[in-house]
């Protein structure tokens, strides 16, 4: 029976033969305290933005002017 290292090596070789290449992707660690704090900060900012309608009122007013032309 092949070792896990050997199986992984064979798998990578077969995939390369099929025209694939390995790609490493770095993603945020959603388990970290830093990620949780940033997600919370962004959620609060979105909630606050929902309370302020001035920007959206402006956008809607401008789009209505464009529709009238």
Image: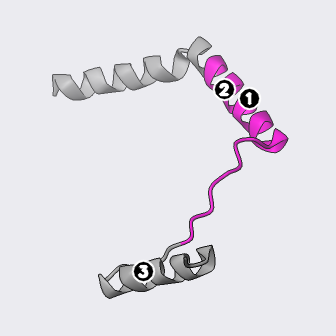
Residue placed under numbered mark 2 in the picture: 43
Q: Marks 3/2: CA distance?
A: 37 Å
Q: Viewer-nearest of labels 3 and 2?
A: 3
Front-most of residues 3 and 15: 3
Q: Marks 1/2: CA distance?
A: 5 Å
Q: Earlier in the sequence, mark 3 or mark 2?
A: 3
Query: Is 64 within the magenta?
Result: no
Residue placed under numbered mark 1 in the picture: 40
Crowd around label 2: few <14 · some 14–19 · many ≥20 (10 Å): few
Q: Residue at x 50, y 73 (%)?
A: 23
Q: Is 59 above or below relative to 32?
A: above
Give the image quarter of residue 8.
bottom right
Q: Does residue 43 appear to the left or right of 15 in the view shown?
A: right
Q: Secondary structure at mark 3?
A: loop
Q: Viewer-nearest of labels 1 and 3?
A: 3
Query: For residue 21, which numbered disc appears in the image?
Result: 3
Q: Which percent across, then down, holds residue 51?
A: 61, 12
Q: Quick one: quadrant of the N terminus?
A: bottom right
Q: Residue furthest right?
A: 33
Does the residue at mark 1 contact the one at mark 3 (Cβ under 8 Å)?
no
Count of marks overlaid on the render: 3
Q: Which residues are magenta?
A: 24-48
């Amino acid at each position: 029976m092949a070792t896990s290292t050997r199986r992984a090596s064979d798998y990578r070789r077969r995939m390369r033969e099929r025209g694939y290449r390995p790609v490493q992707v770095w993603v945020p660690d959603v388990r970290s305290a830093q990620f949780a704090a940033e997600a919370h900060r962004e959620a609060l900012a979105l909630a606050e933005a929902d309370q302020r309608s001035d920007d959206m009122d402006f956008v809607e007013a401008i789009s209505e002017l464009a529709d009238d032309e």
